[in-house]
Amino acid sequence: EDHSMRAKAVAHPNIALVKYWGKADVEKNLPAVGSISITLDTLTTTTRVRFDSDLDSDRLVLDGRPASDERTARVRFCLDLFRRRRHDLPPALVESENSFPTSAGLASSASGFAALVTAVNALLDLPIGLDELAEIGLVLDEFGGGTFLVREFPQTLADYQSMRGFQEMAESLTDVLIAEGDLKDALYDRLLSQMACSAAIKAGEPIPLVEAQELLEELMEMENPYTCPHGRPVIISYAKHELDKRFKRA
């Protein structure tokens, strides 16, 4: 009896013309600056995935040979992201083959993970969410090699048009897809709350007295004036005896 689920996908590597240096966030693998690269459509990475309850753990075969523990761990981490949405996923055998030398500097790991994610996503029938993003004005086209071309950008998210801002937005999208699944509703809630905090007056920033008074009046009209959208306190209450103590009047 076959206890497995199978899928296959093909992706293309790319080569950097202007390469980023350094990482803004090592854990999340976000680059410090942008880069420019081209996709090589004549070269391919073919990845086959088989989820099988008879396997005892995830396995990776790269170009016909068992991969190192380090590479297998990276694949397992990727598969575990899918398991957050599908808790019943069994271990997987991932077989990836490149039509070019794996260590030739052509981003074979990027094309390998692009093919892996595409295959698993198709197998599990989990929507990427491009149609939902288009409904709120963010229009993306698949551009090969695990990359996307931004066609349209909503005015309401204009603060995210910088490279760093777009990375923050992409990170938020990833969190929504992994944790919540309902992309469009969660997207606006999360991004607009993040924009509100980013645009807020920072500690120590001087503002005119009239503007400060207007801000306080608008704050008092809100349904929840006590915290920012992320839950950080806006108003802190002190009892009179605490104030007396702090001003050494107790």
Image (spheres, rainbow, N blue to C red):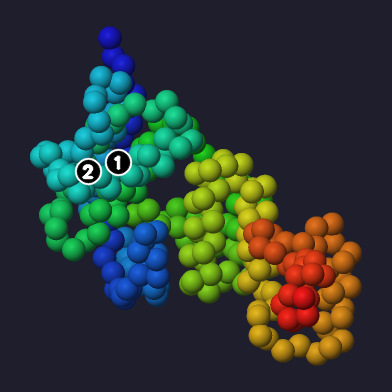
Q: Most extreme residue toward the top, as rendered?
A: 1
Which amino acid lies under the numbered mark 1 shown in the image of this protein? Arg
Tell me the residue at 54%/56% (across/down).
172
Tell me the residue at 28%/69% (across/down).
16
Residue 2 position in % (x across, y down): 28, 14
Does any portion of residue 124 appear in the rendered image?
yes
Residue nearest the observer in this picture, 138 or 180:
180
Horizontally, residue 244 falls left or right of residue 27, namely right
Residue nearest the observer in this picture, 223 or 233:
233
Does any portion of residue 10 appear in the rendered image?
no
Which amino acid lies under the numbered mark 2 shown in the image of this protein? Thr
Tag 1 residue: 76
Residue 75 falls in image quadrant? top left
Tell me: residue 243, above or below residue 237: below
Horizontally, residue 38 falls left or right of residue 232, namely left
Q: Which mark is residue 72?
A: 2
**Contact (CB < 8 A) between labels 1 and 2?**
yes
Dot 2: what SS? helix
